[in-house]
Amino acid sequence: MAPFKGRKKHPESPEAGIKRSFGWVAALGAVLVVGGLVGLFYVGFATITSMLLFGWLLLVGGIVGLVQAAQNRNTNFFWLALVVAALYIAAGVVVIRNPEQTAAALTMFAALLFLTGGIFRLFGGMVVRGPHMVWTLIQGAIGILLAILVLADWPESSVYVIGAFFSLALLFDGLGLLGAGLGGRRIVGMVADARDAPLTRQ
C-alpha cells in the first residue's frame, strides 16, 4: 500500500508575502491609532502610563549597561560605563516610584524648552529676515504661547501635558504606519495585476 501523501503546498508568491508584511504594518498602525485616541480621552492615565514606561525603559537600560560594564571590566571605559548604568537605574527607580512628580518636572522642562525655542525663533526671524521669516515668527509665537499656557497652570498642567503629547505621538505615528501599510498593499496589488494582465490576454 502506497504511503499517504498530503497535498503539496503551493509556494507563496513574493507579492503575497509583501502584502502580508504591509498588512502587519497597517495592523500595528491601527493599534497605535486606537491607543492614541484612548490616551487623548484619558490624558491622566496616559501621563502615568508614559512615565511608568519611561521609568522601566531607564531601569532596563541601566541593567543592560551594568551587564555590559561587567563584561568589559578590563577596559578603560569600565568605570564610566558603571557610573552611567548606575545613574540609569537610579533614575528609573525614582521615575517608577514617583510618576506624578516626574511628570511635573518634565512638564516644567518642556515648557522652558518651548519658551526658550520660541524666543530664539522670534529674535532669529527678525534678525535674519530670510524667505521663511513669517513661518519662523509664527513658530516662535506658538512656542511662547504654549509655554505660557503650561506654566500658568503648573503643576496641575502636568496631569495632561505629557499624556497629551504621548497620545498625539501615538496617533500620528499610527496614522503614518496605517497609511504606509494600506498604500503598500495597494501598490503591490497593482503591480501584480499589471504583471498578470498580459498573461490573461493571451
Image (cartoon, rainbow, N blue to C red):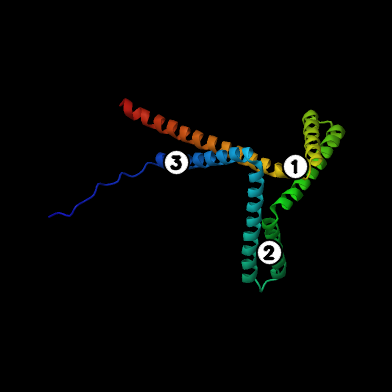
Identify the image quadrant of the N terminus: bottom left
What residue would you read off at disc 2? 85
Mark 2, residues whose alpha carbon is within 10 Å: few (<14), some, or many (≥20)? many
Location of residue 193 in the rendering, given as x and y in whole percent from the top left corner: 40, 30
Residue 116 versus residue 76 in the image, above or below: above
Residue at (76, 50) in percent of width and height:
105
Residue at (51, 33) in percent of width and height:
183
> Secondary structure beneath disc 3?
helix
Residue 64 versus residue 161 in the image, above or below: below
Location of residue 7 in the rendering, given as x and y in whole percent from the top left corner: 25, 46
Task: Give the alpha-carbon distance from disc 2 to disc 3, as whole Å.
Answer: 40 Å
What residue would you read off at disc 3? 18
Mark 3, residues whose alpha carbon is within 10 Å: few (<14), some, or many (≥20)? some
Quadrant housing residue 20:
top left
Q: Residue 51 has which mark?
A: none
Which amino acid type corresponds to the residue marked 3 in the rendered image?
Answer: Ile
Location of residue 127 in the rendering, given as x and y in whole percent from the top left corner: 87, 34
Task: Give the alpha-carbon distance from disc 3 to disc 1, as whole Å.
Answer: 45 Å
Residue 11 visible in the snapshot:
yes
Q: In the visual, does 163 lie left or right of 189?
A: right
Q: Earlier in the sequence, mark 1 or mark 2?
A: 2
> Secondary structure beneath disc 2?
helix
Identify the image quadrant of the C terminus: top left
Residue 117 visible in the snapshot:
no
Q: Nearer the viewer, mark 1 or mark 2?
A: 1
Which amino acid type corresponds to the residue marked 2 in the rendered image?
Answer: Ala
What residue would you read off at disc 1? 157
Q: Nearer the viewer, residue 106 or 2?
A: 106
The residue furthest top is: 201
Which amino acid type corresponds to the residue marked 1 in the rendered image?
Answer: Ser
Task: Give the alpha-carbon distance from disc 1 to disc 2, as whole Å.
Answer: 32 Å
